[in-house]
Image (cartoon, rainbow, N blue to C red):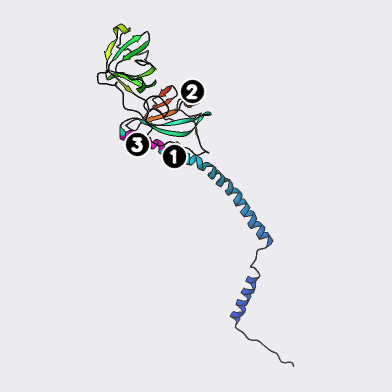
Amino acid sequence: MEPVSLILCDPRRLVRQAKHSTGSRRRGLTLIELVVVVSLLILLAGLAIPRVQMAVERRPVREAARAVNVYLGAARNRAMASGRPVGVALQRFPNQPNVAMTLNQVEAPPPYAGDTTGARAQVYFAGSDLTAELSNFTSDMVQVGDRIQFNHQGPWHRIIALTDTSVTVEVDENRLYPWPNGVENAALATYEIRRRARLPGETGLHAAIAKPVQLPLDAVIDLTFSGTQSQPALFSSASAGTAPVVIMFAPNGGLDRVYHGAGETQPGQPVF
């Protein structure tokens, strides 16, 4: 009989060797697993890339909206601090009047009551026009669209025509006025003119009180469908022409009025 040789060892060592051998066979990925992983990565990239592109494309619009909001807030705060109307003018792009890219902050000049304390107006109706011949008056200090009040009472009349010595004002056909007919019967009254904010380049005194804001090249203010709640296209060039849209805040922090071309609105509703 041939001798039998036996090798004795610790059984725990055999277990460790078995585990090591099994692990070494599973270090890599099979081709199927690799294909599945790559497919998942492609799917996730396909879902994420459009969202990233959309966020990048909207970034100029978000930045522009933030800049406009801050600029409007600064104008409102200055109106409350100064006690005079302050606002923001939306400058129309020269070749595209329904687009605004530049904003100017403007402040209404102090009221004008003539060059001396003795300034007076001779007020009368000439047909259906209410006219005021003004003494101690410098026409360069006033422009069409400003408002005049007589004897510190009654309505503020919008000036619709202007000469070196007189103004013609807008009247309400449904309102009674105390003024006589004919220049020979003109009534003497004090006057005060509440002037609109002027923009650089306009005649008369203007007050641009802050540096203009230029929106990013990829974002503009669309005036085609901008206006009030009841008139959503009020600020479009078809309605307001090529003049800037000027949004004015009152000293109490509320919206005073909006100038759009030759017209103006004192809105009791939101402005969009």
Q: Is residue 272 above or below residue 37?
A: above
Residue drawn at x 62%, y 79% as measured from the top left: 14
> Toward the viewer: 159 or 205?
205
Instruction: Give SS at disc 3.
Output: helix
Q: Position of residue 258 (x, y in %)?
A: 41, 27
Q: Does label 2 or label 3 sit earlier along the sequence?
A: 3
Q: Does label 3 or label 1 sit earlier along the sequence?
A: 1
Res 91 seen here: yes
Q: Is residue 205 magenta?
A: no
> What span is in magenta?
71-81
Q: Which mark is residue 239?
A: 2
Dot 2 amino acid type: Ser
Q: Position of residue 76 (x, y in %)?
A: 36, 34
Q: Which mark is residue 67?
A: 1
| The N terminus lies in quadrant | bottom right
Q: Position of residue 21 (x, y in %)?
A: 64, 74
